[in-house]
Amino acid sequence: MPTTLPDVFDIRSLVADPKFGSLLDYIAAKRRGRRWVARTDIDASEIPRLIPNLWVIEIEPRPADDAGLGDAERPRLRVRLAGTQVERIYGRRLGGEFLENMAWGTHSARIFATLNRMADDGLSHFLDASALIQPRLSRRVRRLGIPLSDDQQRISHLLLLAYYEFVAGQPDHFHEIWLDAEETGRNAPAVLNEDL
């Protein structure tokens, strides 16, 4: 089973990718001088080809813990929308579920760390990860995550564009690129972290 998703190694290849590049262009056009786009700026009718692979994740604020015990373990990433291709991969409807309650494989801790960093720091993020899900069968995901803010003060949602494939014999890998939220993606500085 050959891989069908093209590789993205850097900003140039991310922007050149027809799917991820089109989402970056769409977000850049919606920004209108603001640091982040609001969830209400996203109009599904304007990006119909991307909708099957989109997630919209609502970030629930963590309440202050007066007891000083911290609340870092409470789920806060709630699925508000999952496209048809995303739900096909997971085999069920995902709306209303917390991401923290879903199984994500061997990279779960790292994936949640990236999602929480996006929510806390307002940075966009590209991820290419593969994990063994059955003997000799891996699930690979390529995902671009963009933070959204309804009030320009805190991140209210994450917009994720994700493509999945199943690959025989592919070793686990975790490759990521961080993007500054203020950049359009056309000439964005990035930090690349790779663990193969």
Image (cartoon, grey):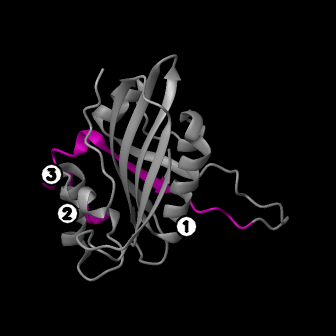
Marks 2/3: CA–CA distance: 12 Å
Mark 2 crowdedness (10 Å alpha carbons): few <14, some 14-19, many ≥20: some
Residues rendered magenta in the picture: 40-64
Which structural element holds mark 3? helix
Mark drawn on residue 120: 1
Relative vertical location of residue 33 with respect to residue 190 in this rendering, above or below: below
Does residue 69 appear left or right of residue 136 in this picture?
A: right
Q: What element carries label 2?
A: helix
Percent x, y of residue 41: 26, 65
Query: Is disc 2 in contact with disc 3, using a CB cutoff of under 8 Å?
Result: no
Amino acid type indicated by mark 2: Tyr
The tag on residue 26 is 2
Q: Earlier in the sequence, mark 2 or mark 3?
A: 2
Which of the two residues, 102 or 165, is positioned nearer the viewer here? Answer: 165
- Residue drawn at (51%, 39%) of the image: 97
Marks 3 and 1 sit apart, C-alpha to C-alpha, by 29 Å
Numbered label attached to residue 45: 3
Is residue 50 on the magenta stretch? yes
SS type, badge 1: helix
What residue is shown at x 23% (from left), y 60% (from top)? 15
Residue 127 versus residue 42 in the image, above or below: above
